[in-house]
Image (tube, helix red, strand yellow):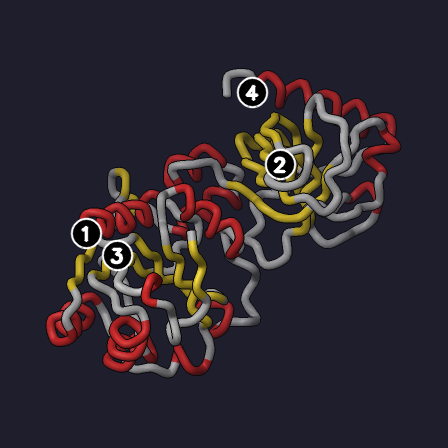
């Protein structure tokens, strides 16, 4: 997959795609319906138009982190779906200041040369979100590209949405989130140095930061882990603690992952950690010995849960 971070000056090979357009945070089943519609719309390379940073981060910088995945994780997920071109457009004063007409002309036609655009039925675009699906369809008729609006996807009366997935994760309902996503919710990132207390306890962990990401319910999870880079690329099971480590003083939330039956150095490597099942809330123990006993119990429970995965 080729990643393009501007709409101007693209090579001929990067133009003329059929594109799905949106933020695609989580790449859930509703997003996949939009992407699948793009694959059916025209005989052209499959592209995705998305925005980085997320517009909400620009317009509401004071808000708590809300993203389900960072840009790297989103790109990895989209590549698995067969996307050939990812147009990760820089969202800032220039792009946000374009009227719907200017966006369609300058970005979609003159910049990307799109053949067809698919969006969700609730898609809005342009300065002050002035454009909607009807606007895009009218502009497509005028400027020579097709438009498909995909109805919102859901189960029963509930629509699949990034907001609903965030709520499920905040409540520890990982399997409900998985049903809306179509895959396990994954946290991806680089392994960083921690305080190495887990190693001292006999339970070494790979530490990952959570900056900029929506926080699922703090606590302990059964997890599936993919090591994406380095000499130890593999997939394995594990147990992870997401939280602030109350035994040792308040810290910024991070993810500490213990990989079952693995020995090796993962510092600087990138992991993808799937939250399969919530086991218990984070808590403060009376002694290190009690903590170690609970870690063993958590690991035994996680192994049993993951045995069939």
Element on which disc 2 rests: strand
Residue tagged by mark 3? 120
* C-alpha distance separating marks 3 and 1: 21 Å
Q: How far apart are marks 3 and 4 (CA)?
A: 36 Å
Say whether disc 3 or disc 1 marks the residue closer to the N-terminus.
Answer: 1
Give the Cα separation between the discs numbered 2 and 4. 21 Å
Q: What element carries label 4?
A: helix
- Is 10 on the left-hand or right-hand side of 298? left
**Callout in the foreground (3, 1):** 1
Disc with the residue nearer the chain's start (3 vs 4): 3
For image coordinates 84% across by 45% down, the residue present is 195
Separation of residues labelled 2 and 3 (CA atoms):
33 Å
163 sits to left or right of 15: right
Residue underneath mark 2: 227
Which residue lies under the disc numbered 1? Answer: 43
Q: Distance between the residues labelled 1 and 4?
A: 44 Å
């Amino acid at each position: 997959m080729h990643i393009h971070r501007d709409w101007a000056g693209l090579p001929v090979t990067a133009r003329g795609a059929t594109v799905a357009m949106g933020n695609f945070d989580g790449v859930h089943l509703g997003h996949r319906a939009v992407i699948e519609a793009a694959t059916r719309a025209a005989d052209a390379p499959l592209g995705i138009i998305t925005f980085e940073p997320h517009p909400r981060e620009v317009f509401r910088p004071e808000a708590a982190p809300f993203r389900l995945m960072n840009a790297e994780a989103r790109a990895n997920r989209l590549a698995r779906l067969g996307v050939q071109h990812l147009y990760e457009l820089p969202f800032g004063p220039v792009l946000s200041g374009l009227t719907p007409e200017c966006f369609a002309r300058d970005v979609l036609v003159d910049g990307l040369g799109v053949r067809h655009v698919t969006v969700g039925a609730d898609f809005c675009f342009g300065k002050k979100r002035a454009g909607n699906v009807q606007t895009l369809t009218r502009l497509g008729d005028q400027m020579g590209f097709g438009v498909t609006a995909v109805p919102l996807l859901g189960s029963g009366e509930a629509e699949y949405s990034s907001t609903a997935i965030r709520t499920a994760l905040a409540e520890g309902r990982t399997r409900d989130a998985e049903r809306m996503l179509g895959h396990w919710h994954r946290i991806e990132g680089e392994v960083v140095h921690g305080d190495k207390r887990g190693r001292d306890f006999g339970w070494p962990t790979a530490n990952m930061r959570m900056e900029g990401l929506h926080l699922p319910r703090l606590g302990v999870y059964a997890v599936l882990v993919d090591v994406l880079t380095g000499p130890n690329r593999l997939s394995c099971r594990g147990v992870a603690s997401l939280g602030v480590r109350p035994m040792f003083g308040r810290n910024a939330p991070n993810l500490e992952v213990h990989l079952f039956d693995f020995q090796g150095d993962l510092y600087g490597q990138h992991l993808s950690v799937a939250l399969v099942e919530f086991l218990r809330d984070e808590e403060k123990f009376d002694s290190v010995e009690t903590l170690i006993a609970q870690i063993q119990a958590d690991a035994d429970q996680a192994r049993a849960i993951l045995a069939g995965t």
